[in-house]
């Protein structure tokens, strides 16, 4: 069965516009989340992740250029929702606490996993659609960096933030 409007090429373009929107909004959100982080290592990690995310925006613009398509966004309700929920969590959680830090890590990891899923599929679709190697490489590099960011945040959570949050509960 042939469905021209909803084929892989269509999914690919829509997802590219979706993740372009998501990355752009995440740059701003990470700035705000980082400013709320209590722990300096987490603050630093979120600032770094913000810089890396801005790099992902530029990389996507390069992908659009390689496709000869204008870089347009498609509102991503998933990323909007994650950011909205995180802002609600910040409002509900005590300022300057390890508990807030644990919540921020949780939130940013949810965003990272949304992106890992998207970039993973974009790479797979691009390969199936036999897009050029340089384009696939750009998407793959970002996929790799999203996984790295996720691992760094897991490390911070497990090394000390979760334990500190537990101590706050017991205090
Ligand atoms: Fe990203």
Image (spheres, rainbow, N blue to C red):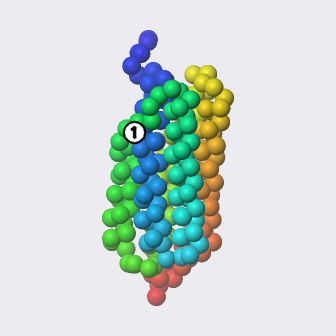
Q: How packed is label 1: few (under 14 Cα within 10 Å), some, or many (20 or more)? A: some
Percent across and percent down for residue 52 are 57, 54
Q: Quadrant of the N terminus?
A: top left
Q: Tag 1, which secondary structure?
A: loop
Residue 133 sits in quarter: top right
Mark 1 CB lies closer than 8 A to ligand 1: no
* 146 and 51: which is toward the camera: 51
* 64 and 155: which is toward the camera: 64
Percent across and percent down for residue 95 are 39, 78
Seen in the picture, residue 162 relative to 52 is either above or below; the reply is below
Seen in the picture, residue 113 relative to 127 is either above or below; the reply is below
Residue 116 sits in quarter: top right
Q: Is residue 152 visible?
A: yes
Percent across and percent down for residue 102 are 49, 69
* 150 to the left or right of 33: right
For this orientation, the residue located farthest to the top is 1
* 58 and 160: which is toward the camera: 58
* 92 to the left or right of 23: left
* 131 and 91: which is toward the camera: 131
Percent across and percent down for residue 124 are 59, 31
Which residue is tagged 1? Answer: 73
């Amino acid at each position: 069965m042939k469905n021209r409007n909803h084929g892989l090429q269509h999914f690919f373009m829509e997802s590219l516009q979706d993740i372009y929107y998501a990355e752009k909004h995440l740059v701003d959100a990470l700035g705000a989340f980082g400013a709320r982080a209590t722990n300096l290592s987490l603050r630093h990690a979120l600032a770094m992740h913000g810089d890396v995310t801005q790099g992902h925006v530029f990389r996507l613009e390069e992908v659009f250029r390689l496709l000869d398509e204008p870089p347009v966004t498609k509102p991503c309700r998933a990323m909007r929702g994650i950011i909205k929920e995180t802002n609600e969590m910040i409002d509900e959680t005590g300022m300057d606490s390890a508990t807030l830090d644990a919540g921020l890590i949780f939130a940013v990891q949810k965003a990272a996993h949304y992106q890992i899923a998207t970039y993973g599929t974009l790479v797979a679709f691009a390969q199936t659609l036999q897009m050029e190697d340089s384009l696939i490489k750009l998407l793959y590099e970002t996929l790799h960096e999203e996984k790295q960011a996720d691992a760094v945040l897991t490390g911070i959570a497990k090394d000390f933030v979760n334990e500190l949050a537990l101590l706050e509960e017991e205090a």
